[in-house]
Amino acid sequence: MTPTSDVNRGDWLTALAAFAFVLVTRANGEFLVLVVIFVVAIFFIFTMRKMQMRQGVALLILVVLIFGAANSWRARQELRDVTTGSYAGIAKVMSDPRNVGYATRIVLEIERDRFVVYAYGSPAWRLAGARVGEQVFVRGYREEFEPGKESFWISQHVKGRFQVASVAEQRFAASPLLRSAQRVRDLVSTSASSFNFDERNLFTGLVIGDDSKQSEEMISAFRKSGLAHLVAVSGQNVAFVLAGLSPLLRRLNRRWRTLMTILILVWFVVITRIEPSVVRAALMAGAAYLSVAMGRPTRTLRLIALTVFAAIAVDPLLAWSVGYFMSVGATLGLCLGAEKLEKIIRGPQWLARLLSATLSAQFGVIPVVVFVFGVPSVFGIVANVLAVPIAGLVMLIGLPLGLFAGVIENLGRSEFATVLMWPVQVGVRWVWWVAEIFARLNVGPVFNLGLWIAVLVVLLALRHRSARV
C-alpha cells in the first residue's frame, strides 16, 4: 500500500461509491432503493463531469449500485423464506455455546435454515459441550422471530428461533478443517489453565476472539472503558499473525509465499469463527499483499473501499453487522487521521504515534458507536493509551506461545507451561485492570460531551499552530 497521505480524488470517489453501495444494500423497500440510486447517480454524473472523466464510469457505478440493491433484495428474501413447525432430526452447530442467564444460547442449522436456541435443563448441558461443525439429533419446534427482534441476527443469517425439547447425547464429528481449528482453540485455552477464570477468557478473547465464556461484568467493563475492540479480533491480530510467520514465509519463493499467505489468512478466519471484522481484515490484508506482489501497490483508502465492495457483494447481510462497520470505521480513521495527527501532537514520538492512532481509530468508529451504544466515554482515550500497547504484545506472542505451552500442558508438564505463560498472564491482568478502573470513571452525558468538544478544540488548536509553523 502507498502512504495514506497520497490520496487523490479518484480514491475519494471509490470510497463514496462504496458508501453508496452499502446505502442501497441497507435500504428498505424498492421505492427507497430507486430513489437512493437516482440521487447517487446524479451526484456521481455531476462529479465525473467536474473531474473530466468519462461518463461511462458513472454508468458503471450506477450498474454496480443496481446490482447491490438487487443482491440485497435476494438475500433478504432468502432470509424471510423459513420453514416453521415441529422438527426431529439432525442439526449442525454453527456457533460456540454461550451462557445467557440460566440458558445456553447456540445457533443451529436445520435443513439449511439457521435458528437461535435458548436451551434450559438437560438440553442446555448437552449443547454446552457442542463444537462448531458438529451434528446433533434434536427435537423441537421452529418459529419465526417476533417483530422487531430479528435485527441482531440478520448478519448471522439466523432466520428464527428453535424451541428445543430434547437433544441426543451422541454427536457427529465436524469437518477436518473445523476440527483442526478447534484443536488450535483448545490448545490456546489449555495454555492458560493456570490463569483465573476471567483472565483465561480475556486471553482467548484477545488472541483468537473467543469471548463465548466472558462474564457480563467483563463485557460491560470493556464497553464502558472503550476497550471492547480489543476482544474483537480484527486487523491488528491478522497483522501479528503474518508478522509472526514472516521469517518462515520469506524463505519461500514468491509464488509459494503468496499461496501460503492466502491459506494462512483463510485458516485464521476459520479459527476465529468467520467474524465479520476478521473477514474485513483478511480481505484487506490479502488484497494488499496481492497488489504489492503484482507490483501495483494500492492506496489504502481505495483498498478499504474495494474491500467493502467485495465483502458486501458476496454477503449483503454484512451490511447489518455492527462489528464489521466498527472495523471498517477504525481502519478508515487510521488511514485518514493517524499520520496527520502524529505530526501535530507534541511530545515523544512514541507517545505521539500512540495518541494519534488511538484518537483516529476512536473518531473512525464514533458514528457507529453513537448510533448503537451512545456517546463513548472520553476517558477511553487514556484507557486505550494504557492498554493497547500491552494488549498488542499479548496478541503478538500469545498465539505462538499459547500453542507451544498448550502442547507442553498436554504432555503433563504444567509447571513449565505456567512459567512460560507467566509474562502473558501479567499482560492480560494489566489490560483487565485498566478496563475495570476506567469503567468506573463514569461522568454525566453533558460533561462527557463537553470533554469531547474540549478534545476537538485542542486538536484544532494544535493543527492551527502546526500550520502556522
Image (cartoon, rainbow, N blue to C red):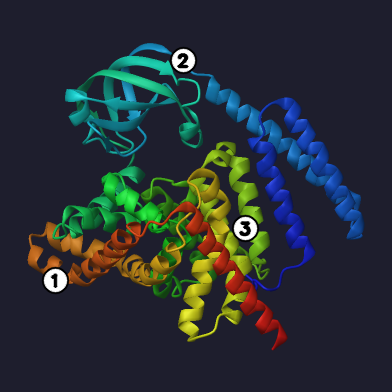
First reached walking from the N terminus: tag 3 or tag 1: 3
Residue bearing mark 1: 419
Q: Where is the N terminus found, in terms of image quarters?
A: bottom right
Per the model, the C-alpha gap separating discs 1 and 2 is 53 Å
**Residue that extends furthest to the bottom in the rendered view of this protein:** 469
Question: Where is residue 464, by image quadrant?
Answer: bottom right
Q: Is residue 449 above or below residue 343?
A: above
**Element type at marker 2?**
loop
Of 448 and 151, nearer the camera is 448
Which amino acid, mark 3? Answer: Ile
**Element type at marker 1?**
helix
Per the model, the C-alpha gap separating discs 2 and 3 is 38 Å
Q: Where is the C terminus found, in terms of image quarters?
A: bottom right
Q: Which mark is residue 83?
A: 2
Q: In this view, does 320 lie above or below 303?
A: above
Which amino acid, mark 1? Answer: Val
From the viewer's perspective, tell me whether residue 291 is left or right of residue 100.
right
First reached walking from the N terminus: tag 1 or tag 2: 2
Which amino acid, mark 2? Answer: Thr
From the viewer's perspective, tell me whether residue 95 is left or right of residue 195.
right
Q: What residue appears at the point 89 percent right and 57 percent down from the top-left corner? A: 53
Residue bearing mark 3: 304
Residue 393 is situated, as x and y percent measured from the top left of the image, at 34, 71
Of 107 and 295, nearer the camera is 107
Q: What residue appears at the point 32 percent right and 57 percent down from the top-left corner? A: 440
The 10 Å Cα crowd at callout 1, few under 14, some 14 to 19, many 20 or more, is: few
First reached walking from the N terminus: tag 2 or tag 3: 2
Residue 144 is situated, as x and y percent measured from the top left of the image, at 45, 18
User: Is there a contact, CB below 8 Å, between mark 1 and mark 2?
Assistant: no
